[in-house]
Amino acid sequence: MLVANDPETLDPRYVTDAVGLRLTRLVHAGLVRLDPDTLAPEPYLAASWRWLDAQSLRVELRSDVRFHSGAPFTARDVVATLRAFASPVVASRHASVVEAIAGAEEDGDHAVVVHLAHPHGTLLTDLELPILRADQASGPPAPDGTLDGLGPYTVASRSEGAVALSPADFAALSKPAHSIIIRTVHDENARALRLESGRADVAQNLISPTLLPALGAQPGLAVASRAGANLTYIVIDEERGMLGDARVRRAASEAIDRSLLCATLFDGRAEPAGGLVAPTHWAHADVPPLAFDPHAARAGLAEAGVALPLRVTLLTSTERLRGDVARVVSQELADVGIVADVVPLELGTMIARLNAGEFDLAILALPEMTEPNVLRRFLHSALVPPAGANRGRVRDPELDRLLDDGARVSAPDARRTIYARMEAVENSAMHVIPLWYEDQVVVTSVLARAFVPSAEGRWLGLAQLR
């Protein structure tokens, strides 16, 4: 399997990059995993669960699972893992995931009771957290993947540019049929040549849409896609002059022809966004598509009293496709009087400028939209950098209330109603401009033809290849 970058670490307590996160989920497993289509939580290491009250969840554990080493999986491992992720000594990068947990206790060898400090609606999704062996959970960092796991693969070796995974004898899933090498190839043309020559079997979201037809025509290769749950959007710094006016933000949205961009630059492998949560996701609300209406955009700018042309910067990544997208968006904005100067930046530099508020507009993506509560981090007024990732400096009391409710309520139907209301507020205020939901696109060889990624792009489907 080809990837664009090496994983930063294979230790699930510290991994944050996309490649590392997806890779460690092949080696480790949580009490919960996400349905590959709807992303709703379902049992994995857990056999079942039930709420004892609004702040206590009892989880029954599977008794048929062992760690890769053969060590038994018990309630002690779960309790030790939750404590380790919360420990300031361990200093996990994912400590925030367990911050609502007041404690956990063993209820025999195969059950755990998790107590919340306050009502917390995302606990089940949070319990996707990888479970470590009790005697390793608070140990030193293990960047080479030496921690005992419960996932379908073990790390056989790690070197610069390659991670080799072997099927695990003891795991939460049946033993996979194939070993895997995760191979880093930075250049897109080199990735395409490897696929053409039979030196690679899987490339996910790594080939530009313009190259896909040629690869799909090659003997032994196939191109497949599935609807994705990940949002591409424009973030707007609302503290920058006229961008604080919702009429200006809506005008920018109305200037963009999403359908044209999806059909051309993405070769039809993206769906225009009507809101923040994709149609495949369990929390999706039935919202109307966002209009492409340059005439209304010009009228909105005139109503807001904008002196045209309105000059802004538009940050984007240095990736070729993203640069093409930004240039087309810039041209469409210019057609209504918003002159956007495209500024391509490396990811680290872009994030620094976003956090410092040194931008007007930026095209970004939420790479793993697994839980709608993630929107709280990007839109809540209490989470302006450095406290969080509200880089648009959004301050909307009604939106704050709904985001807080969504984080607190646990019943799925009630949460779905809350996020539908949030979509309505966001659609009116246009704090961010939703663009599209990109498909998960894979190029595969005959050997990997059956591989299908999940809606958020994870790789557990590799373990089902036969």
Image: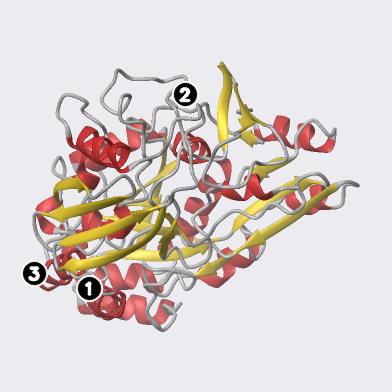
Q: Secondary structure at mark 1?
A: helix
Nearer to me, 112 or 411: 112
User: Where does the image place residue 150, in percent across and percent down from the top left?
Assistant: 47, 38
**Mark 2: which amino acid?**
Gly
User: Where does the image place residue 262, in percent across and percent down from the top left?
Assistant: 58, 65
Nearer to me, 427 or 287: 287
Quarter of the figure with the N terminus: top right
Nearer to me, 455 or 119: 119
Residue at the image point whose x is 83% and y is 34% from the top: 198
The mark lying in front, picked from 3 and 2, is: 2
Q: CA distance from mark 3 to mark 2?
A: 44 Å
Q: Secondary structure at mark 2?
A: loop
What is the crowding at mark 2: few (fewer than 14 residues within 10 Å), some, or many (at least 20)? Answer: many
**Mark 1: which amino acid?**
Ala
The mark lying in front, picked from 3 and 1, is: 3
What is the crowding at mark 3: few (fewer than 14 residues within 10 Å), some, or many (at least 20)? Answer: few
The mark lying in front, picked from 2 and 1, is: 2
Question: Where does label 3 land, which residue?
Answer: 397
Circle nearer the N terminus (3, 2): 2
Question: Where does label 2 land, which residue?
Answer: 145
Question: Where does label 1 land, which residue?
Answer: 429
**Mark 3: which amino acid?**
Pro
